[in-house]
């Protein structure tokens, strides 16, 4: 896909999610919310970090404008991914939206302590999930001003 | 006992081991003799002076009184007349000893004998002998004390002791009597059995031998309390200690102490009960309770984890069947549409069930501490949460002033919300009217009532409605999984209360639940 977002620049979103069903559902929801989004998928924490650091197969990976991060992931879990992103000077400017089924108080607290930009629960109902994806698009990809200078850093 | 007031006399235990005392010299018809007489009369005991032949040579007024004779009736008479046995014999020399030696052996010792009065009556006496040297040879001064009263007391004591011993033996527990030094002075057969000793092995022994710790220490006085106070503190309270048998084995005991006044001072009676069986039962019970708690907790965790983890795959099923239905409705045949519709309905119903199950299990596993809370505020919040339902149904909800209670506020809100929500929901026609009130019962608990004018419930279902997923109506009539009242019940029970319903079909229902009162945060 080579769809153009605002100001002619495509919007890059990294979805870190291990469940194929959720990946597809999120893709479907974003497709109907905003077709001009490049949705990249990493299925575990290690893969996500490789993508962000342009390592291995991800040598030509785009720098994402937004990261949607699940907490419970294989290999390296979402909390660790979040911690590494926020520790990395070149990555910490990318907003990270936690998107998880967990509503445990502990998970919410630690996520914000690790500087998550916001914490969202995956709704159980399809309609509600679609509505949530729509609002993510409206807020994070339309209303919010995102830094563009990082483009310089990317290959 | 008081000694006769003949002054430089050897007396007491020392006299036995000391060298023979020098006899007092009594001269005839001089001043010293007069002095001696005066001393004799001043003595509190009866005094009789006897010569080697066993004849009375001198006596005092007390002797006259005690034996009922006039002085002249006794002077020159044999002492055998007033002390028939045991006196004269003691003073007689035999082949083995001289008269001095015979006397010396008796000096300073109280000898208990029988006195006989002029009227022939007898009475117990104690005599003390001392030698008196005179011109007529060695005389013997006998101080004679009437010990009738003491003897009676001793007899009484012996009787008491035998009665006490009877009681001791009849007691179902091991009984041990201990003196202030912690020595065993008396015990019963149960004590012998319990500790595996023969009586002789225990009498005179330290209590520490059979109760190594905690017994002797408790009877000791310290700077803060007298021995009496120390004991008084322990009386009547069961103290759990460890007993040790002769073979060294130990067993749990409970002891009860009580004081026993005796001639030797305050003794302590200890009733000792072997509580092995009770202890074992207690331990077993504790173990069972622990097990039960653990399995309850595990069950709670299980329900939570199961419902939480089930939600994930189910979310997929529900989402994709919904997606399927949305995209392909009318594009396949009518059978496919119907099948998909059933799948969507089943999945979403199961989702509700799992969510309710999760909510139910959270009451136990995710509950907050019970704090002082305003039940009126909780009701208000519940009504705010229900405002759409209330507006839609036109329900009229009223309430009395409601008290402070000890509650998990979130759960209290949920409780009101479920009960008021039910009252609005189960209506046939007309305006739902709901009234919430509270009154204190005899147990000082608040009884809350949520009264409605709804459909009412047949009494045969009163118990069932509080069960999990119990429904009285078809799904087409009233939606819901049937968890609402089960959640109410679990909330109320977690708060130490109970919930019940009173109703008649067609006449509305009143749900009542109890809560413990709280302090006003003023």
Image (spheres, helix red, strand yellow):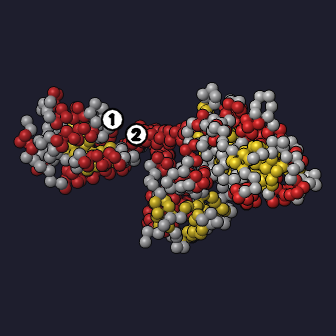
Quadrant of the drawing holding the N terminus of chain A: top left
Residue B448 drawn at (x, y percent): 57, 65
Label 2 element class: helix
Quadrant of the drawing holding the C terminus of chain A: top left
Q: Residue A19: which disc?
A: 1
Residue B494 drawn at (x, y percent): 53, 53
Left or right of B402 in this view: B102: right
Vertically, is A102 above or below B74? above
Residue A27 drawn at (x, y percent): 28, 41
How many numbered marks are there?
Answer: 2
- Chain bearing mark 2: B
Does the image show residue B126? no
Residue at 90%, 55% in the rendered image: B73
> In front here: B333 or A19?
A19
Question: How much space separates mark 1 and mark 2, taking CA atoms?
Answer: 10 Å
Residue at 63%, 38% in the rendered image: B18
Dot 1 and dot 2 within a common chain: no
Residue at 60%, 43% in the rendered image: B181
Q: Are marks 1 and 2 in contact (CB under 8 Å)?
A: yes
Vertically, is A105 above or below B16? below
Q: Quadrant of residue A58?
A: top left
> In front here: B29 or A88?
B29
Residue B514 drawn at (x, y percent): 58, 61
Residue linked to disc 2: B312
- Chain bearing mark 1: A
> In front here: B520 or B447?
B520
């Amino acid at each position: 896909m080579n769809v153009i977002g605002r100001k002619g620049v495509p919007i890059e979103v990294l979805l870190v999610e291990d469940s194929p069903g959720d990946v597809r559902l999120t893709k479907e929801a974003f497709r109907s919310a905003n077709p001009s989004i490049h949705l990249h998928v990493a299925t575990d924490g290690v893969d996500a970090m490789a993508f962000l650091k342009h390592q291995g197969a991800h040598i030509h990976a785009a720098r994402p404008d937004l990261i949607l991060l699940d907490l419970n992931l294989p290999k390296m879990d979402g909390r660790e991914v979040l911690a590494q992103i926020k520790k990395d000077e070149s990555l910490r400017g990318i907003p990270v939206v936690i998107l998880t089924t967990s509503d445990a108080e502990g998970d919410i607290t630690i996520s914000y302590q690790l500087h998550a930009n916001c914490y969202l629960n995956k709704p159980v109902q399809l309609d509600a999930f679609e509505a949530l994806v729509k609002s993510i698009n409206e807020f994070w990809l339309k209303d919010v001003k995102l830094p563009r200078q990082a483009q310089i850093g990317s290959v | 006992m008081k000694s006769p007031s003949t002054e430089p006399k050897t007396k007491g235990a020392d006299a036995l081991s000391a060298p023979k005392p020098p006899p007092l010299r009594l001269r005839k018809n001089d001043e010293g003799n007069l002095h001696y007489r005066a001393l004799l009369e001043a003595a509190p005991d009866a005094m009789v002076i006897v010569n080697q032949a066993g004849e009375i040579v001198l006596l005092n007024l007390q002797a006259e009184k005690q034996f009922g004779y006039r002085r002249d009736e006794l002077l020159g008479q044999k002492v055998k007349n007033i002390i028939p046995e045991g006196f004269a014999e003691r003073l007689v020399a035999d082949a083995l000893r001289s008269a001095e030696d015979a006397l010396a052996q008796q000096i300073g010792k109280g000898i208990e004998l029988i006195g006989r009065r002029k009227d022939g009556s007898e009475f117990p006496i104690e005599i003390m002998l001392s030698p008196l040297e005179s011109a007529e040879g060695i005389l013997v001064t006998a101080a004679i004390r009437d010990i009738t009263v003491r003897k009676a007391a001793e007899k009484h004591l012996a009787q008491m002791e035998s009665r006490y011993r009877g009681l001791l033996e009849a007691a179902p527990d091991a009984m041990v009597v201990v003196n202030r030094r912690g020595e065993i002075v008396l015990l019963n057969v149960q004590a012998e059995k319990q500790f595996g000793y023969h009586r002789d092995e225990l009498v005179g022994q330290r209590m520490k031998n059979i109760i190594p710790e905690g017994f002797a220490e408790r009877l000791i006085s310290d700077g803060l309390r007298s021995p009496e106070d120390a004991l008084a503190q322990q009386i009547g309270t069961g103290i759990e200690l460890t007993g040790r048998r002769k073979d060294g084995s130990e067993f749990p005991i409970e002891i009860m102490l009580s004081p026993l006044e005796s001639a030797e001072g305050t003794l302590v009676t200890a009733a000792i009960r072997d509580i092995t069986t009770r202890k074992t039962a207690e331990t077993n019970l504790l173990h069972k309770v622990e097990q039960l708690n653990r399995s309850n907790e595990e069950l709670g965790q299980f329900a939570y984890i199961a419902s939480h983890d089930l939600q994930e795959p189910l979310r997929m099923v529900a989402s994709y069947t919904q997606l399927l239905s949305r995209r392909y409705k009318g594009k396949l045949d009518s059978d496919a549409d119907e099948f998909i519709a059933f799948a969507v309905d089943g999945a979403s119903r199961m989702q509700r069930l799992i969510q309710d199950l999760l909510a139910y299990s959270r009451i136990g596993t995710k509950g907050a501490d019970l704090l002082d809370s305003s039940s009126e505020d909780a009701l208000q919040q519940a009504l705010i949460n229900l405002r759409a339902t209330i507006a839609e149904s036109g329900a009229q909800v009223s309430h009395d002033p409601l008290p402070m209670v000890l509650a998990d506020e979130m759960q209290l809100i949920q409780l009101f919300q479920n009960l008021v929500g039910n009252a609005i929901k189960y209506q046939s026609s007309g305006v739902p009217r709901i009234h919430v009130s509270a009154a204190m019962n005899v147990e000082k608990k608040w009884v809350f009532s949520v009264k409605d004018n709804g459909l009412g419930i047949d009494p045969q279902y009163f118990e069932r409605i509080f069960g999990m997923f119990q429904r009285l109506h078809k799904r087409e009539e009233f939606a819901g999984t049937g968890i609402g009242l089960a959640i109410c019940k679990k909330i109320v029970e977690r708060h130490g209360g109970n919930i019940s319903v009173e109703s008649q079909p067609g006449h509305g229902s009143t749900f009542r639940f109890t809560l413990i009162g709280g302090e006003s945060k003023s």
